[in-house]
Amino acid sequence: MNFVQRGRIYLIGQFEDCYAKFKDGKLLLGNKRLERCYYFQDGKIIAGSLWDKRNQSCALLDSERPFVLPYGEFENLLIHCETEDANGLSSSSLGITVKMENDFATQIYHVEIFPDMPFVSTRFSVLRKTSHETEKSEKYDLIECVKLPTIHYNIKVMELFDKDDFCDTLIRIVEDSPYPNRYAGYRGDIFVVEPTGESQAVLIAKDSPVGTSHLNRPVHDLAVTSGEFEVYGSGVDFSNLPVNEEVEYYGVTVGIGDKEKLVTEYRRLLSLRKKGEGRLFVMANTWGDNNCEKALCEEFLKAELDAAADIGADVVQIDDGWEKGIITDPNRYMEHIFEGFHRASSEYWTVDLKRFPHGLEPIVEHAKKCGVRLGLWFSPDSYGDFENWETDVKILKDFQKKFGIRYFKLDAVMLRSKTGDRNFSAMVEELSQSGACLQLDVTAGDRFGYHYKVQYGVLFIENRYTDNDTYFPYRTLRNLWMLSQVIPSRFLQFEIANPRRNVERYGDDPFAPNRYDMDYLFASVMVANPLLWCELSHLEKVDAETLRKIICVWRSHSQALYQADVTPIGESPNGKSHTGFWACNGSDGYFVFLRENNDEAEYEYKIPTLAGKKLQIETLASNGESGIEQLGGAQNKIAVHFAKCNQYVFAKYKVVDPC
């Protein structure tokens, strides 16, 4: 710290409107929206105040509690600043790294800030230098501390859930008004704090897997006392830190803004963290018909590619069963292991020549003729905390090099420690840098989830089947609608199963898949990456033709939909609602209006953000007669007339002038 002359301010670095300054042990970080300070004094680090530049007000006060470092107070301080973009996978931001050292450990504090965004993201990491032990203590698990200038506020707690093979509500939102000057503890992932009577709010989001996949999860993620908000959950086992190996904590994002817009801005922040493919894509995967690996052969996959080309799908993904494995009995195939592959057989991930006597070459050539890309299912070896990750990377890179395959669904991942987190991160990083497009399954096991390390791939959300009555289209729509409140919909992949299979199993259920048109099912997930979760060559002709038509329309707008900020509108889907999505791209955008199984032919959607603006609205596609009228008003009501139940209207709008 001796490099600082007292009383002088040093500009450490800047990028666009972002800057980092240092003065008398105080680090100042900011942009045009906010400024946050941190104190590095007397060997301690303390989170300081946050200034809201738009409202010229102090949104957060200096915290009174320093972070407790596991190996004691630091003696030396080194600050480094640079522009970061996750090695080309995210938009550019200003990154500040503070390295604090003593004889026992190096503690690193990293801060990230994006231009014109009202958020600051932080995370710790620690590198143990010696065999000197430290006890396991909750005090080390504190990862953020903020203090409001009031003790009167409401808290909106958003808790997300993965492992949806076992649950079907993926986000729960509750509100609370804590007792002033008393302790309150909450479990959750995103917290919106609204001071009483104020239009501004504070958002606190853990940059970690969701609670059900969180390593070493604390009793409470957020602890509140008298306006002091402490965030816990580093994910680190401090009693078992390795020597000379940097261990990264989970992080935290803190933001300020209009309470009506702050969650929308958080979605924008997540979007900045992932560049992705640049447009939405349609993938087909035959696993959804529940024949598993039994149908896989060259003839079948060529038929699937022909059907995909006709329908307009971008990718056909070959799921589990293409690999040789170690189980030779076809009746026991699904008993195969889910880790320890390389210990079981060095040929585990070679092509099964019993199913594919000519290898994948004829299928790859047929895909090229059809203009359809191929994808593969793959299970990274979780054994030994992914100790064989480099071998797994080599296997998939070989498929990229030899066959041009770059779409890989990564399944059966089991993250058990920070070492596993680091090794799996290294794997997906190297694959992403090689041009692979990853589909990360979150249906079971402890995995990254929705808003942790989001720069990698898209998320495969659900396994739903008509064979066991778990596929109900309105529930798939509901999960997309709920998640898209806080997660960019382009991060997600949602399924469309063949609704004509297993009709008898559903009987007279009013929400049975067979009651929906095929284009309605597509429209219900078109703001995500639609997954045709079925054998395309076995679709009924009318369904295949209906799909072809809607995909043809949608494809012309898939890039714009990818770039848009998508907000759920209308009512929460329940099978009988009026619901939908609004995709905003500045002065233009899209609406997906959906009438579920109800008796109301007309519904007034409220889009208050567009109030005072006259819209020119064009219907692009619908499965029935429809009418759209902008009524205006403070809520900017848009009346939509539907001709039948289970009807969609896909529309494009443009702002033409103020009303």
Image: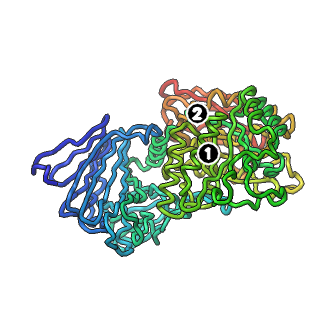
Give the percent coordinates (x, y) of residue 447.
56, 57
Which residue is at a point 78% across and 39% down the rendered structure image?
A: 518
Q: Give the number of the disc on residue 279.
A: 2
- Horizontal side of residue 340 vs 304, given as left or right: left
In front: 92, or 645?
Answer: 92
Location of the N terminus (image quadrant) = bottom left
- Residue under label 1, please give it: 395
Give the percent coordinates (x, y) of residue 83.
34, 39
Residue at far top of view: 656
Residue 420 in the image: above or below residue 51: below
Residue 168 shows in the view: no
Amino acid tagged 1: Ile
Residue 127 in the image: above or below residue 372: below
Residue at far right of view: 504
- Say what secondary structure mark 1 lies in: helix
Which residue is at a point 58% across and 29% down the rendered structure image?
A: 653
Amino acid tagged 2: Arg
